[in-house]
Amino acid sequence: MGNHYHHLTTYYFSGTGNARNVANWMCDKANNCGIQAESIDIGKSERRGIAPSDKDTLIAFVSPIHGFNYPVIMLRFIIHFPKGKNDVVLMNTRAGMLIGKWVTPGLTGIAFYLAALILWLKGYKIKGFLPVDLPSNWISVHPGLNQKTIEYLHQTNEIKVTRFAQTVLNGGRYYKCLRELIQDMFIAPVSLGYFFVGRFFFAKTYYASSKCDNCGVCIKGCPVKAIKTVGGRPFWTFDCESCMHCMSYCPQKAIETAHGSIVLAVSVVSLLISDKFFEYFNHYIFNASFPPIRFTIESALFIIFLGLWYGISHFMLRYKWYERLMVLTSLTSYKFWGRRYKSIRKY
Ligand SMILES: Cc1cc2nc3c(=O)[nH]c(=O)nc-3n(C[C@H](O)[C@H](O)[C@H](O)COP(=O)(O)O)c2cc1C
């Protein structure tokens, strides 16, 4: 491998360690061929006022995909990144699963295109894209993967990252994933839905059960400082990115996803925000029959309602019967579902 670059800087965000591993694999490959490399966790370091990089530096951004896009913390980081003319590679970690020996890939959505556009407007040259299908950490929506699958996905993906690193560190380009463009564009509306509504919804699905001993690990470890103590127990604010860090690293395994409560909340809100409601709304407030306007109003009301629901539920958790009911209706509290996910830490 020739030394096309003298330095590799990898900026990464990671909830449960997959993106951290990818960043470290990249640095490892760079070091192996005599290129100085550093990986910077943007969840733990200064995110504003980053100094421009030397011209011989290759810059890599690595982040999980959340709702078919980069999470807000990474998007904001890229938006505030200084202008420059360096070569850049964009990498993501997605929801890999295993069916037999077949790794089912995750979906990138608009993440690469949006980030590439912002960086290109700042003057950077985009030299490669790599989606990495590491184990899915989204244990709120599916049971946790088993250890064998987790190990297999790590092994196969490290090889994939090595190939990518060999190409881009040598000055080559790597655009293979652009063949996913059509499917990515197809799901673009869902990424917007997640950005404007979904992420706020998921932020209000977490609570701490009576197993919580207030050790503060979730509050200190939250990369976006979205967890506060309210009434003596952890409280998830709308800033939560649902990165799964808290759920996965809680030493007491006390953090759950409130499936039962959320199903009830969604049912109640869909009864309240009905056609009848809009008849009154259109009559007494203003005419919201144009579908995008109606959708915006519905979404805003939904989020406000959910915030109130969450506040009341948080208050009610002090009552033992309510806390038990919440736990019993949380799939994450059951053995068949409840494995927490942490990537394999080799470094
Ligand atoms: C809230 C949330 C949303 C997610 N959305 C997607 C998605 O749209 N597409 C996908 O492929 N994976 C998705 N995933 C899975 C993660 O991107 C994937 O597991 C990633 O490897 C986790 O990386 P990390 O360990 O660095 O946080 C999602 C996970 C979470 C928690």
Image: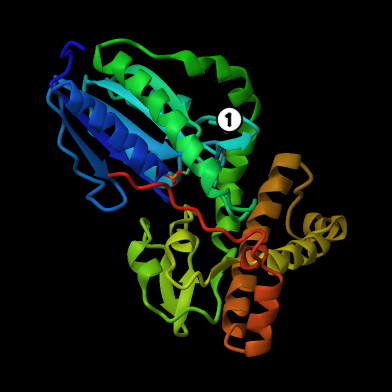
Quarter of the view holding residue 105? top right
Residue 120, visible in the rendered structure: no
Residue 214 position in % (x across, y down): 41, 80
Q: Residues within 10 Å of mark 1 (few under 14, many from 20)?
A: some
Which of these two is toward me, 170 or 307?
170
Nearer-the-camera pick, 234 or 209: 209
Q: Position of residue 48 (x, y in %)?
A: 23, 46
Asked if the residue at label 1 sits under 8 Å from ligand 1, the reply is yes
Q: In the figure, is residue 234 to the left or right of 337? A: left
Image quadrant occupied by the N terminus:
top left
Which image quarter: residue 72? top left
136 vs 213: above or below: above
Residue 90: x %, y % from top left: 37, 27
Q: Which residue is mark 1?
A: 105
Q: Give percent across and percent down for residue 134.
A: 48, 37
Local SS, label 1: loop
Q: From the viewer's perspective, is residue 172 above or below residue 303?
A: above
Asked if residue 17 lies left or right of residue 57, the reply is right
Q: Quadrant of residue 217?
A: bottom left
Of 216 and 143, nearer the camera is 143
At 63% from the left edge and 23% from the top edge, which residue is drawn? 183
Snapshot colouring: rainbow
Question: What residue do we see at 42% from left, 77% from top?
Answer: 229
Q: Which quarter of the figure is the C terminus placed in?
A: top left
Name which residue lies at 48% across and 65% down: 237
Q: Is 325 placed left or right of 312 in the picture?
A: right
Going by the picture, which residue comes out furthest to the front? Answer: 148
Is residue 77 positioned above or below 45 on the image? above
Three-letter code, disc 1 = Pro
Residue 48 lies, with reference to residue 185, above or below; the image says: below
